[in-house]
Amino acid sequence: MAVAMAGRAIKPSLDVLQQLVKSQRENVAEIIEMEQKQIDALKDGLDEEVKHNNALEEDCLEMEAKIKLVLANHKLVHESLAKSYSYERIDLSLNLSGGSKFEKELYERMMSIMYEEPQYLSVMLRKAEPMEVDALVQVVVDRLYANHYKARDEYYMLSLLTHAIGEDMSSITEPVAMLAQVNYVTKLLSAYTRRGPNREALKACLAKPMSLVLARKKLELEIEPSRVYTTILEELRFKSDTDMPSMVTSTEAWKLPEVRAAIVPRIRILIDFVELFLTRIIAARNVLPYGLRVLARKVYDAAKDRFPKADVSQQMAGVSNFIFVSYICPAIIQPEAFDLCSASSRPSSHMKRNLLRIASTLKRVGSLAPYGANEPWYADISAFVRSSSEMMKQFFSNLSDVPLLEEQRRVTLYLESTESLTPTRSFELNSIYLLHSVLYRYYSEIVSSSDNPLHSVLLELGNMPDQVSQEQSRQVLLRLRLSSRDMLITQGSRNAGVAAQADLQSELRQMLLDALRTAPAVNLRQG
C-alpha cells in the first residue's frame, strides 16, 4: 500500500504537465522578446556606426583627392605662394658664414642664362664629379625646368636632353652600347620620364595589366633551373633514394624531368603576361607624349648617323634602352613608386621577383635579343622574341615618326604667349652654390669667350662658394628674366635659315596674337 502511494505521488497529473509547458512557453517568449530587443538595439547601433564610417570615408576620399591634387601640382606651389604673398617679402639678404651676402640679382641672371642655354647645363653635367651628378640632375629637372606642363620648360628640357644625347654618341663604339651604361645622360632621361605627363601616360598604359598580375597572389614565375631545383630539392630527395647535392648548375638542373615539369608551364604564363604588357604598350604609342617620341627619334637618328652599316635591330638598340630600361621597366618593377597600385595591393617581395622577371623578359623582347643556344630552357622565350621582332621594329619606327624639336618649336612658341617671361623658381641655397661651383671649376669649357653673358656674371660673383650648413640651406625664390618671343622668333629664324615666306608667316601670327591679347573681350589665359 505504501509502495503504491509512493508511485502515485511521483506521477504528475495532466494539469501539472499543462501548467509546466505553459510556463516554459511563456519563459521562451520572454527570452525571445528580450533577445529581439537586444538585436534591434545592436542594429540601430550598427546603422549609426555605418553612417559614421561612411561620413569618415567620404572625408578621407575628399582629403586624398586634395592631397593627390597638391602632389600633382607641387611644382607650382612656390610660384603661387610668391604671387600670393608678394615676391619681395622673401628676405634673401641673410648673412652667411664668413659674413658673405647672398647675391640675389647675380644668381637670378645666372639662372636665367642657363635656363635659355641648356648646352651649358649639358657640359656641366658631363664635367661634374660623379657624386655631384645626381644633385645636379635633380636641380635641373625638378627646379630649373620645374613646370612639367608648360611649353617653354618642356622645350628647353628636351633641348638639354638632345644636346646631351648628341655628346654621349661621340664615346659610343658599338650600337648596342647606346644608353646602356649609367651616366649623366641616362640619369637625365630617367628623371625626365618621371615628369607629370610621362607618368600619366605610363599609368594609362600599364595600370590594367599590372592589376591583373597583382591579383594573382600565388603567381610563380621563377624559371631559372638552378633556383627551381633549390625550391623542390626536398621533394626530389624524398622521391629519390640517392643523396642529391644542395647546389647544381642550371644545365644540370634542366636535365631533371621534375625541374622541366615545373618550368615549362611557368614560361607559358610568363609569355602570356609579357604579351599582355606588350600589346598595351604598342597600342599606346600614338598617345605617348611628344617629348618621349622626339627623344626616341633623336636616339634613332644618332644611331643611323653613327653606325650607318649596322642592321636595323642594332640601330634600334638605343631606342629600346630608352623606352624599356629608362621608362617602362622601372615602373613594372616598382609599381608603388609610379602610382600603378593601391596601398592595399602593394607587391610583396615574392611578387616583386615575378615583376622583375616580366620586366626583364619584356626588355629582351624590346631589344630584339633572343637567348643563346646554351640556355635551352629559354627556347620558348627566344622563339617569342623572334616572332615579335618585326612588330617591335614597326613599333620603334612609328614611335619615332614625329616632327623634329625645332619644327615643333615653331608651333609651341605661340603657346607661350600666355606664359610669364619672369617666372619664379625655388632652389635650395646649396643647390645654387653647387651650380656656381661647377660653373667656376669648368669655366674654360663652358664659357667660350668674354662675350659670353655668363662671363660677366661669374666675374661679379667671384670665387666659387662653399656649401653652407643644413640649417642655413634654406629655400630661395629666384625670379628669372627670359627673352621675349620676338627675340626668339628672330633668332630662331636666323639660326635655322628659314625662308622669307616663313618669316612673314611668323610675323603675321605674332601680330595676330598681340592683337588678340590687347582686345578687351579676349583673354587667352582663360581661353
Image (spheres, rainbow, N blue to C red):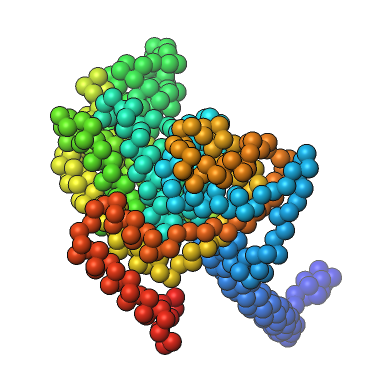
Q: Nearer the viewer, residue 364 or 276?
A: 364
The spot of residue 297 in percent (x, y) is 26, 46
Q: Is 305 on the left-hand or right-hand side of 108?
A: left
Kindly tell me whether residue 292 is visible in this rendering: yes
Residue with the most extreme bottom position: 521
Please tell me which residue is depicted at 31% across the width and 32% down the height of the picture. Answer: 169
The spot of residue 296 in percent (x, y) is 29, 45
Q: Is 15 on the left-hand or right-hand side of 422?
A: right
Q: Is 257 on the left-hand or right-hand side of 160?
A: left
Q: Nearer the viewer, residue 52 or 10?
A: 52
> In the picture shown, does residue 23 fall above or below 314?
below
Q: Nearer the viewer, residue 64 or 34?
A: 64
The spot of residue 55 in percent (x, y) is 62, 75
Q: Quadrant of residue 77?
A: bottom right
The spot of residue 206 in percent (x, y) is 36, 53
Please tell me which residue is depicted at 39% across the width and 11% down the height of the picture. Answer: 242
> In the picture shown, does residue 133 fall above or below 67?
above
Q: Quadrant of residue 53?
A: bottom right
Please tell me which residue is depicted at 28% across the width and 24% down the height of the picture. Answer: 173
Kindly tell me whether residue 380 is visible in this rendering: no
Please tell me which residue is depicted at 61% across the width and 50% down the height of the picture. Answer: 106
Q: Nearer the viewer, residue 106 or 338?
A: 106
Quadrant where the C terminus is found in the figure? bottom left
Quadrant where the N terminus is found in the figure? bottom right
Residue with the most extreme right position: 2
Number of numbered callouts drawn = 0
